[in-house]
Amino acid sequence: ERAKKCGVRFVLRKVTVPSGGAGFEAEARQLRYEVLEEEARKAAADAILTAHHLDDQLETFLIQWMRGSGPAGLAAMPPLLRKDGCTIMRPLLGFQRTELERFAEIRGIKWVEDESNEDTKYLRNAIRHNIIPELEKIRPGFKTAAARSIELIAEAAETLRDVAEDDFNQASENDGKYLRIDDFLALPAGRRARVLRLWLDRVGFKPLPRTRLLEMIRQIKETTKQSVCLMFSDGLEIRKYGSRLMVTEHEKPESEAEIIVEWHGEPEIDLPQYNGKLVFTPAEEGFNEGYLKAQPLSIRRRSGGEKIKIHKFRPRKALKMLFQEAGIPEFERKNLPLVWRGKTLIYVGGVGSEVREQVDDDGTPRYKIEFIKNPGLFS
């Protein structure tokens, strides 16, 4: 009815809130914003306006304080937030609930009171009904002063974000995918955790508590291994490799079984077990078509001790040495296919082809073999 009077379209959406995970309140809030953002895109809206007020802001601050949040969390809700091309505005943050209720009464505006607002099993409601009134008794009018503190914290948090951004730009490379360890550790101790948190957010790693961040920084400083996984979660690994920190997709081999393929001239062969494909491209130097079609090819993972000659005027070398020369990290080597023709290793993903098997020319066209990974998070 209110929408009709205002001449605006009303949309009702129902969602199912999953149990567990981040908790009912957090899950519901996430779903609510997802729906709002989806409807905003449908309507080609410039912004989403919410009716959060000063009491909501104070409750959020106290919740974050009880959780041990830092400045970013204690800054509570920003009056304006741009996120993924969507602008969220909260124009009523400066008004207390009682002020808005009085305004609505004077203007004859009716509102709906959500019955769940009275249920104190939810932390926010417990703070609203049990904590805020007691604080008001102890210090009448404290809300206005507390709001100023939140504004100051928000200003400090913004400054800290700017500093972390500058530090991150100085210590990162490859469009922020990697952190240079020497530059990272050269930062003052108090700024390392902020840079690490910013970096993990950029590469899609879930937020970590401060204790985990500090433990990771200790491991980064003290470990002497060339390659070590510092943490694993949700299919991603935080890894120290040489002088860099990187986040990689954690890939478990689906099967160690040998794959037998017959090549009939197709330009590529999918290898889902290796998250990629073999590509066959016409080339002046490569394997003859007759050679590749004469018998099936088998594809296996590295088992150790394999050697191959990839340069005409250099000796045959062990794969371990060739991987090192190619700069392929140890944790990626297990996911590269080895192509065999009978008992002869003719191609190694990321390394190259056996040149001695390209000498005899039967007059058929030649093809170069190349393994190409499927596009991923960190391609």
Image (spheres, helix red, strand yellow):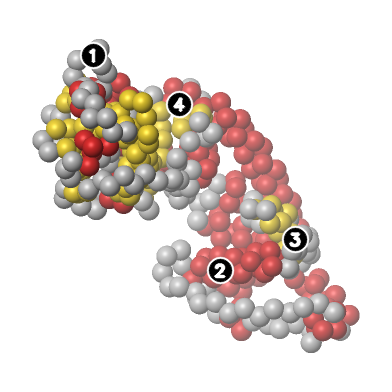
Residue for point 22% across, 42% down: 293
The reply to whether discs 4 and 1 touch (Cβ–Cβ < 8 Å) is no
Residue at mark 3 to residue at mark 2: CA–CA distance: 18 Å
Report the Cα–Cα distance between label 4 and label 1.
Answer: 34 Å
Which image quadrant is residue 97 in? bottom right
Which badge, 1 or 3, is on the more N-terminal residue? 3
From the image, tell me which residue sits under label 4: 180
Residue 379 position within the rendered picture, expressed as x and y whole percent measured from the top left: 45, 40
Residue underneath mark 3: 47
- The answer to whether 133 is drawn above or below residue 296 in the figure is below
Q: Say which amino acid is labelled 4.
A: Arg
Q: Which residue is mark 2?
A: 31
Number of other residues with Cα within 10 Å of mark 2, as a class: few under 14, some 14 to 19, many 20 or more = some
Label 2 vs 4, first from the N-terminus: 2
Amino acid of disc 3: Ala
> Residue 77: image x %, image y %?
66, 57
The earlier-in-sequence mark between 1 and 2 is 2
Q: Amino acid at mark 2?
A: Leu
The residue shown at (71%, 59%) is 88
Separation (CA) of disc 4 from disc 3: 39 Å
